[in-house]
Amino acid sequence: MRKLEFTSLQVRDIETSKEFYTKKLGFELSEMENHEAVIFKFNRGETSFAIRKPLENLENKELGNGISIWFAIDERIEDLQTQLIANNVTTLGSIMNTPFGKALHVKDPDGYKLTFLEPI
């Protein structure tokens, strides 16, 4: 195996999640269309990422437990943190130093942990 090609997360309410990822996090919609999913482009199209309708019944199931998806950013992490707080995004702790750079964790509506990284 040499690289992760694509990531998609099953979500309970695709419209709520679409609004979160576009309006609160600033992800752009891809030109690709899929009636089962919403596909985003991130960082000028360098990342393929999607949210999708569930493949199975998600009632009474915990989503996002044990999963963290990392996105590298071009801006300063402090500026992103200010923007996310202004957009009422749930942040998980403060900015932290990692071996890869400065990171900030947030939580999406389904409990998935997203990490934004200002690389070294």
Image: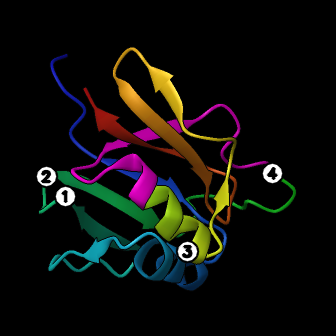
Q: Is residue 47 magenta?
A: no
Amino acid type, mark 4: Lys
Which residue, given by chain and number where applicable, does mark 2 sit on? 46
Q: Earlier in the sequence, mark 1 or mark 4?
A: 1
Q: Position of residue 58 (x, y in %)?
A: 73, 59
Q: Nearer the viewer, mark 2 or mark 4?
A: 2
Q: Position of residue 43 (x, y in %)?
A: 19, 58
Which residue, given by chain and number where applicable, does mark 1 sit on? 43
Could you tell me how far apart the alpha carbons at marks 2 and 4 are, in whole angstroms? 31 Å
Q: Residue at x 23, y 54 (%)?
A: 48
**With 17 as the anchor, is 72 left or right in this view?**
left
CB of mark 2 within 8 Å of CB of mark 1? yes
Amino acid type, mark 2: Glu
**With 59 as the anchor, is 3 left or right in this view?**
left
Picture colour scheme? rainbow
Depth check: give the residue in front, 46 or 32. Answer: 46
Could you tell me how far apart the alpha carbons at marks 2 and 3 are, in whole angstroms? 21 Å
Q: Nearer the viewer, mark 1 or mark 4?
A: 1
CB of mark 1 within 8 Å of CB of mark 3? no
CB of mark 2 within 8 Å of CB of mark 3? no
Amino acid type, mark 3: Ser
CB of mark 1 within 8 Å of CB of mark 4? no
**Quadrant position of the N terminus in the picture:** top left
Q: Is residue 113 visible?
A: no
Checking the image for residue 61, the label placed there is: 4
Which residue, given by chain and number where applicable, does mark 3 sit on? 17
Q: Earlier in the sequence, mark 4 or mark 3?
A: 3
Q: Nearer the viewer, mark 1 or mark 3?
A: 1
Residue 37, picture quadrant: bottom left
**Magenta region, residue range:** 62-79
Q: Secondary structure at mark 2?
A: loop
